[in-house]
Structure formats: C-alpha cells, structure tokens
Image (cartoon, grey):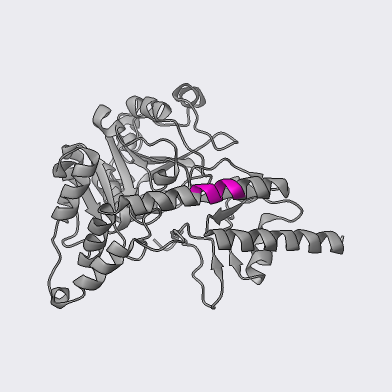
Amino acid sequence: MRGLHAYVPGEQPKIKGLIKLNTNENPYPPSPLVLQAVKDAVDGRLRLYPNPTAQALRERLAELHGCGPENVIVGNGSDELLALATRAFAEPIAAVDAERPADAARATIQYFTPSYSLYPVLAEIHGARKNAVPLRPDFTLPSVAELRRGKLWNFRAALTYVTTPNAPSGRAYASADLSALCAAQRGVVILDEAYVDFAREHALELWRAHPNVLIARTFSKAYSLCFQRVGYFVGHAELIAALDRIRDSYNVNGLGQIAALATLEDLTYYRRNFARLIATRERLTRELTGLGFAVVPSQTNFLLLRPPRFAAEEWLGRLRDRKILVRWFSYPEVSEYLRITIGSDEEADTLLTTVRGILRSGADAA
C-alpha cells in the first residue's frame, strides 16, 4: 500500500472570498423543506442509532423509480457503494491463477479513461487487476465493435465502471450504446450516473433489461447534499443483496436519511435549479467559445475546456490568484484542459469578467 496513489479531491478553500468552481457542487442551497427537516431532527434523536438499512428512504426511492425496496441500497455517498462493489464482485489478483484468462478476468476491474479517478484507487486497494481503456480522442464512447477490434477491452471482466455522463469530460452517452455494452459484458457493470440530472437522457431502466447492471446515483451533485453524503444503487435484488451482506452497520447517518427523504418531497424545487444551471452552462459554453476556449459538449454541471494563449496549469494559477478555484488534472489525456464547475449566474459573470481580464493582460504583455 506504500505505493498507492490515493484519490485526490478538489482543493478546499483555506482563505475567505474564493469562488469555488472546482468540485462540482451545486451553487444553490437545498430546498427550505430540507433545511427545516434537518433542523427539526436536531433533538434527542442524536443519541440514537439511525435506521440501519435506511428503510424509509429505500422505500421512497423504490416508489420514485418504480421498483421494490429490495432493488435499492443506500450508502455513505455513492463512493461507499463503489467500494462495496469492488469487494463484492472482483477477486484480488493474488486469489486467482493469473495465467488463466478466465481466472484473471475474475480479478479484473475495468473502466474507460479519462474517467472518475477513484476507480483505479479502489482496484489498487483491493489488489485487483486494473484495465483502463481509452475513450475516443473526443471523449466519446467506443462502440462494442471498436472495443472488440481494439482487443484492449475485457468482455469477461468481473467489474466494469462507466461514468455516464462522463467525468471529467462532461460527455453524455446514448442509452442504446450503453445497453449494447452491458449486453456484451459477462461481469457486473455499474453505470455511474452522478451527473445525470443535468443530462437529456438517462440509463436507469437498463438494470431491468440486463441482470448484470447496477445504476449509481447520488444526492450530492444535483441535490445540494454533499455535506450529508448520501448515494444509492438501483439493480436486481441479487446484486443488491450481495452488497448488503458486506455493508457496514448504520452506514448512512440519520440526518442524511432525513435530508434525502425531504429532498424527494420537493423535486419541483430541484428541477427548477437544474434548468437554471443548464441555462448557465449553455451561456458559459457560448461565451467561452467566443473567447477562444475549446469547450467539450457537456451534459453535466461542469465544463471541460482547452484554454487559449496559456497552458491549462498556468490558467489554474492565474484564476486562483484572482480568487477563482477551478480544477486541473495532470494526467496526460486531459492535462491541456481545465474543468470548471457551473456556479451561480453571479459566479459565471465574475468568471467571464476575470477571463477577459486575463486575456487582455496577456495581450498587453505580448
């Protein structure tokens, strides 16, 4: 474990006054109903354990998605459930005969790259074999036929993670293409839909058609509950039960369960915020494109873009000097890009004004 490269979260501000556009948080607060529900729950119940299976929340999610509670598991953020899936569905490479392809597949965790950087960390912690397969150069999803021709993809891998829409690119994938991929896989496929509320299409129904598919959702990105850490999976009861058998007791805190339940009672409020953020995303895409940025088409609450004039890492520093935090990744596939969270309209205005100022100052220096 000494050589493990840990997951690196976005920088957390240590000084006041920074505009935080680096961790894909919703800039708008939770519904007033949610805030009131949490305040009302801060009472003598704090001495008690929460419901161990998040039963009421699972029942409400099952009602929302037209399934049974046995098809839903709730976690301490979807990250906990991704970690549980790693343990439940893949073997450590030391436990199999790595010389036998069928055995090696049982220890293989695969994912596209670039993608969520937690996936390789989970595989390393578990001692599994990592199989990272490149997306197309424009970050779109290769077809099953392309994957077969390329011979890099393992159709027998024990566990496959697909982030859809993708992070960090923001690209959305058609459910028909995802369905074809799921049908071709022998192992478990997790479609990680952390950003799906900002997209035109979702893949939730694919778990019904494919018994090897789990859908991951979260209350963090779209529902302004990062602080509470609540996520969930939807899938066939057998897969859900396998995860539940290794789940920690009382894994979801009581206030988080209450906040998530209240969230589901005020979806109209959140859908208005989604529309607001999508409009801001489209405005930023147009204006930044006009300023010379190459913006990847996004169906998320962030933009991946290649900046003009200066290297992306230099832009990171120049924006931070002006109290705007954005994200830059050093790994080669995206090192020429910045990732910028869609903030409020006021934050978007400040970002655009700041970007124009940087471009002007660069032109003056030239």
- For the question of whether residue 19 can be seen, the reply is yes
Residue 223 lies in the magenta-colored region? no
In the rendered image, residue 282 lying in the magenta stretch gets the answer yes
Question: Residue drawn at (39%, 53%), measured in percent from left and top?
Answer: 222
Vertical order, 185 against 78 (above or below): above
Query: Who is closer to the viewer here, 70 or 261?
Result: 261
Q: Quadrant of residue 322?
A: bottom right
Q: Is residue 176 left or right of residue 335?
A: left
As drawn, is 121 to the left or to the right of 62?
Answer: right
Of 81 and 345, nearer the camera is 345
Horizontally, residue 44 falls left or right of residue 211, namely: left
> Residue 233 appears at what percent x and percent y?
27, 46
Q: Which of the image's four quarters has the C terminus?
A: bottom right
Please give the name of the residue rendered at 67% of the width and 49% of the height, measured from the top-left corner. 287
Say whether residue 252 is visible. Answer: no
Image location (x, y in percent) of residue 181: 39, 28
Q: Observer-nearest residue: 3 or 7?
A: 7
Task: Pick the residue in front: 243 or 73.
Answer: 73
Q: Main secondary structure of the magenta part?
A: helix
Quadrant of the drawing holding the N terminus: bottom left
Q: Is residue 150 above or below residue 81?
A: above
Position in image of residue 252 (x %, y %) = 22, 61
Name above or below for residue 180 compared with residue 120. above
Expressed as whole percent of the image width and height from the top left, the position of residue 264 reads 26, 52
Q: Which residues are magenta?
A: 278-283
Residue at the spot 62% in from the left edge and 60% down from the top edge: 349
